[in-house]
Image (cartoon, coloured by chain):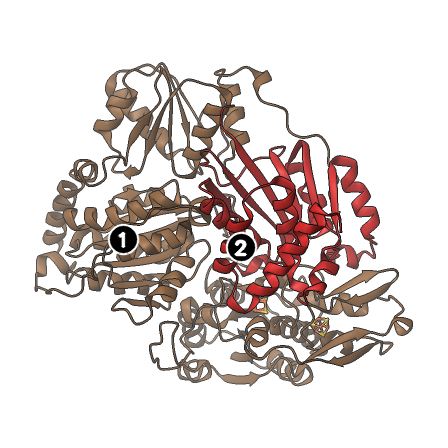
Chain colours: A brown, B red
Amino acid sequence: MALMGNEAIARGFVEAGVSVVSGYPGTPSSEVIVTLHEFGAGSEIYVEWAVNERVAFEIAYGAAISGARAAVTMKAPGASVALDPLISSAYGGVEGGLVVLVADDPGPHTTQTEQDNRWLGPLAKLPVLSPSSPQEAKDLAVAAFDLSEELKLPVILRTTTRVNHAVGDVVLGPVRPPQRFREFRKDIPRFVRAGMLFNLERHRWLSSRLELTEGVLTKLYPGANRVEGSGELCVVTEGAAYNYVREVLEDLGVGASVVKLSLLYPPPTEFLEDALRGCREVLVVEELDPYLETVVKRVLYELGARAPVYGKESGHLPREGELSRRLVAEALVSVGWVPKTAVSPPAGTYPSPPPRPPPMCPGCPHRNTYLALLLAIARAGYRRDEVPIFGDIGCYALSFQPPFEAIWTEHSMGASISMAMGLKVAGYGGPVVATIGDSTLFHAGLQPLLEAVHKRVDVLVVVLDNSVVAMTGHQSTPAWGTTESGRRAKPISIEEVVRALGADRVYVVDPYDLDLTVEVLTRALREPGVRVVVARHPCALMEVRARGVTRRYRVVEDRCTGCLACVRTTGCPALYYSNGRVRVSEGDCVGCGLCARFCPYKAFEVVEVG
Amino acid sequence: MGRRVVNVAIASVGGQGGLTLSRVLAVAAVYDGFSVRTGETLGMAQRFGSVVSYVRFGDSVLSPTFSEGEADYLIGLELVEALRALRLLKPGGLALVASVVKPPLSASLRREELPAEALLEEISRYARTVRVPAVELALRVGNPRAVNMVMLGVFAATSGTPSDSSIRRAIAEVVPARWVESSVRAYELGRSFVLSGS
Ligand code: SF4
Ligand code: SF4
């Protein structure tokens, strides 16, 4: 059947008998848990989003030390959030299989950096597996659990966007019943990292377990590392890049042996020595860092082989961005394996129409909040360039685009508050504003807030509360009373939490009430201390889904002068300019009315629908 | 060059249903026994932004995407996005475009006019182009959002793949139940637009 990579991984988890799955939403990893929620209702599997990746990891680890099979999912930067417990877990090890899905994003398509998490292998000293296709993603997900349990080590399943979000035909396997708690034996040297002698001992244990990896995996999944084709020209590859390599070699009629790896750490040295022994030249094709390239060079050195190695370090492939069929073909030309004429030059010149970066949706409450903030800055008597607005990660970061150009930074989860604090303690005299979403606040913003309160730093924190993790496809937050799996949960109130943390002033407003929001923000801008304004209104997309659209706006043609006041003030994507006037795209407008407020000619009228 | 693979690029504005279209094509092609890959970038950040989906099916397909100049077909659900994606088409490739314009904010902020006729003309300067009154056809089934299914019918009738029966099964599998009927009818209208020229 046709499955997306992430659906295939979810299926693999179920086939392996997983019983605890945790994670934090992040593109391109989110659909694994979303899929489990869809077909997991009423099952014995615990599948829930956690407040952040480290908590998610620790939940999964706590389950796995008791013999349960557990998994945790995250996007690339999430792995850094989970790094502390991840590294310690290698010393304690597990009893039940523990698989850590880390989804990197060469491109990048939706991620702040092109972090290459294959380096987690040597850093955390944990096995790293990497699939190339949806089928392999499912098969390796199953194998990863068995490997983890045999080695007694967590196993990292590292994917990239072009595997997570690729759809392909997948053959399913049998499903094992969920493997739940068996026993948790008190074992102080193993699980207490306070004893330095234990730690040294456990490090030795870890090294001895890692050594077994290649042998165990080869038994469990014989095709994990394989050589396809033959010849003295060798291409070493893994992950999505393998697909480009295979196709391009075939299309260009190049006879080469393709050395395809699924085990990236510890490198399968025995296999590689065999595979590389007869190579005259080696091309390494991989995305992001020259990770395999260093491995290949080491193996050749050990073999005493003199074959030249081409790749990123030699400049034949780029270190940045994702690979493609074309880049692989061009690399084959530049290493001289195919004549230049075999690869057609890139297409000629094409028109470049006006760009369309993703904007905030029509009716998005964040639009109102940023607009109110900009108006409040003026009303409080400041110029816009006197009040730095720190941004954070979520839909609201799209406010960096015209016409708002509101936020000055977007850095990492929760950083808005601590970076704003840093600017103040460095001596900045004017007001500073941190803007942060509700789920980002829960994820990593509460500790920065505590820090700012404790150190008595003046900062205005605006919480853009749309009551959902919107950017990644609408996942639950700790404020929900019921989770996606139907679990009854205790809703956490943001205002109660920030009050308890000691914020000097706490306001709650509905940004759809623009006047009140401007008024409150103006007042808060002038006050000292840590002020928190919770701007709460549901994500417009969610609201439309739940309640439908009851009214829309329309432009009365002969009243519109085409002054663009509405477009420039709101940047709403439902508005567009045509024939000298502004129009509303009927199917896109959700009737928030923001545009109409700012029309000097009263050209908008309401159309009741439904 | 022994492998036979059909490369399809779908250009759309996030929210128009380009992803649904690519999934229906993928599922139908699997029913037909083809090897299939699609490549997307997902996430809410794509709503109202430029989106390109890649669909590939044939003898043995591995890569989820292809490069510039490799698409046999470009399906455009919107004209500005079709224009932007033209570079993906191979020489001699076919552009199937819905006569829909959604002017991007960046154009509106500059008072840039983007009339459909001019866009269509520009597109046809680079590629053989089939223009489809997709909104009118979708409105005929009472579902203005079914432009993607109209274009599915146009593609299937033009290319001859995937098979009609597989596409019908795929629509029923992929599209939410309450939209299946109008989707199928929109698909049929797209088909007959090509087959009978109306
Ligand atoms: S998904 Fe929701 S929160 Fe995100 S931009 Fe759209 S309306 Fe705003
Ligand atoms: S009322 Fe105006 S601002 Fe609100 S969604 Fe409709 S067009 Fe956009």
Q: Where does residue B188 sit, x and y in percent of width and height?
A: 64, 55
- The image position of residue A50, as x and y in percent, is 35, 67
In contact (CB < 8 Å): disc 2 and disc 1: no
Q: In the rendered view of the protein, which quadrant contains the C terminus of chain A?
A: bottom right
- Left or right: where A359 falls relative to A191: right
- In the current view of this chain or complex, which residue is farthest to the front? B196
Q: Which mark is residue B168?
A: 2
Q: Which residue is drawn at 31% across and 58% down?
A: A72
Residue A402, by quadrant, is: bottom right
Q: Is residue A351 left or right of residue A103?
A: right
Residue at mark 1: A99
* Mark 1: few/some/many CA within 10 Å (<14, 14-19, 20+): many
Compared to residue B187, the image places residue A518 above or below, namely below
Most extreme residue toward the right, as rendered? A558
Which secondary structure, mark 1? strand
SS at circle 2? helix
In three-dimensional space, the C-alpha distance between marks 2 and 1, rounded to whole angstroms, equals 38 Å
Residue A342 drawn above or below residue B111: above
